[in-house]
Amino acid sequence: MKIIISITAAMAVFISSNAESKMKNRLAEEQSPYLQQHAENPVDWFPWGEEAFKKAKAENKPIFLSIGYSTCHWCHVMEEESFEDEDVAKLMNRAFVNIKVDREERPDIDAVYMAATHAMNQQGGWPLNLLLTPDRKPFFAMTYIPKESKYGRSGMLELIPAIENAWKERKGEILNSAEQLHEMLNTTHLPIPSMISPTISTAAFNMLTMRYDSENGGFGSTTKFPTTQNLLFLINYAENSSNKQAVEILSKTLKEMRRGGIYDQVGHGFHCYATDPEWKIPHFEKMLYDNAALLLTYAKAAQSKLFSQAERAIYQQTVNDIFTYLSRDMTAESGAFYAAEGADSEGEEGKFYLWHPDEMKKILKEDYKLIETYYDLEMMVEHGRKTGTYILILKAFPNVEEQVTLNAALAKLYDVREKRIHPFKDKKILCDWNGFTIAALAYAGRKDQNKTFIDAAEKAAKFCIDKLFDAEQQQLYHLTMNGNVSVKGKLDDYAYLAWGLTELYLTTSKPEYLQTAITLAELIKEKFVDSSGLIFMTEKDGKLIFRPPSDNDGPIPSGGSIAVKLLYQLGELIGNFKLTDTADLILSAQSNGMNQYPTAYMMNIATIEERKAPHKQIIAVVGTGYKSTEQELSTLRAQLPKSVILTVKSSANEKLLNELIPFAKGMRIYKNRIDYYLCHENRCEAPVTSIEELIKLLK
């Protein structure tokens, strides 16, 4: 359920439709698609803001805070059961001041109250429903709450009167409990600096192997999430250690995810997670961040010598297919990427994606046998009841020729599916998720200079820089919707976009991307990191009950871990050791937690592994009039180890590049020739003039 930021709530209005009038609540004035979805609820919803807080204090009522997002299936279930129900709404309006928040619009509010939920030993998730004192301190938390008690959960009809009575009879106890929790939240994350264990990667690997599902791939034995930071760590760890078990885990997991129902076999792209250990039955929503993360993961696997040529071909095809989905279904006219697609259509989860066998036979005719050859049909089951509809599960990967024939059959299914009622598409443009997608596309396009990938990354980057970054005020913004830019950027926005621009610079050699990335990195130091090394999700503004740190990874890497990766990457690239010193300081502040719970910090440990390879930089100085530049540089990129980066200096970018990379200043540009400098830690070898000589230096 969605959070709305600093927009003043409006009075409820009547909207006339034909002869009828329908009451809308304050959320009708909000930009968020999620809040708009609740605008006609009989619940007297407020957006997050002072009007609601003042009302709660004036009327001495607790606040009912409900957090969700537009494509959240169980959020919609709870809305239909409770928030659209007159009886429940009447109780809520009598007992509470009700606030709805979009967690994608306000990830900071979500982070604060998710931390509080965990501190109360409750499982997190969405919808997230909390009760707060009038000064916003939490004292109760649950995720989905049914209308009536079921599934072992108290229902809204029973719960609200009980809370209302407790507020009257035991208010002092509640306030005292809320105050204790508030104090704990403000002291829990104080740093205990120490040295990161030299065996932390081994410890992390051992913890992953304990949770590894050797039969189905992935980690855990029930619901399966991609958790790509685990896979990115394993790639780096295996490349450094040649650990065969790590390679086996990666190979099994990457292929099982691609075979399973978590992957959309007809239209491409990954669903959010699998509800079973075999990756078969997905939770059907599709999130931009999952697809960006998996595109990057499969791209790294496709370019790694850990795997056979046949495996790398599967991984590269997966990269191509994810991009097909993103470019076709998730790209705005501006070139930026939309946030998500929902799970539900026509009131049913997954209906858009599911098939009746008779329908498939009618569509495919003789090609139905081909589908049977390559796919299992997995019947959907809901609450123990077989639905009679199926999802496609790939049995085995076809070869190139077989894939062409199979694609023609799948295209027939796709064409029919496109005529169905589509799930809701959330068209918010989120800076952090776009930054992640830019980084993934830039990396995936670099090795072979894939123009399609690079162009898509550049268009999204241009949009984010032009529309979401106010260079004069040095302020990045979190999102834009319907042309309106809102919500000051959080750490994730700065870190992910700066990382995306850095990867784009390494792919295109355009220094303007590097320039903006450096600016954002300096703003991260200024706005989000304190003198002890604590890195926070928000700027210091005092508007939340505590300032949430950004350390532990969640479904994707935390903004803090991406900031660490970025600061090391940029610092080493441009020779600015103040940036790498800041990264060291952040890791030192997190070291105690990392040593105790390595798997909560997997992206940081992936970065530690990544930095074990000797990072070197090649600066290619291209003279005016030199022929075959692009062809030669493309050939060079294809031969470079992943730990070696390429920077191109030419007369077109000389002035700016000299400012950004000071040790490149002395590299003169000569007409009609190219010089290659191999550099490490701000020291460069004497230049050579051919790729062959350069490769010898690298060896």
Image (cartoon, rainbow, N blue to C red):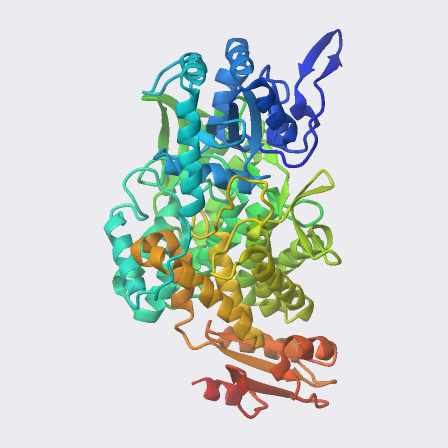
Near-viewer residue (492 or 357): 492
- Report the front residue among 40 and 5: 5
485 w.r.t. 625: above or below: above
Q: Is any part of residue 369 visible from this angle?
A: no
Residue at 63 percent across and 81 percent down: it is 662
Direction from residue 623 to residue 570 in the image, left or right: left
Total labels: the figure holds 0
Q: Quadrant of the N terminus?
A: top right
- In this image, 455 relative to 130: left or right? right
Where is 623 relative to 87, above or below? below
| Image x and y of residue 657, in percent | 67, 76
The residue at 67%/36% (across/down) is: 6
For the point 53% across and 90% down, which residue is it? 685
**Residue 654, position in %: x, y?**
71, 79
Question: Does residue 114 lie above or below 250 as drawn?
Answer: above
Q: Residue at x 52, y 27 (%)?
A: 65
Query: Residue 360: x percent and y percent?
Result: 46, 30
The residue closer to the viewer here, 568 or 422, is 568
Q: Quadrant of the C terminus?
A: bottom left
| Image position, residue 57 (x, y; %) | 58, 24
Which corner quadrant of the image does residue 525 belong to? bottom right
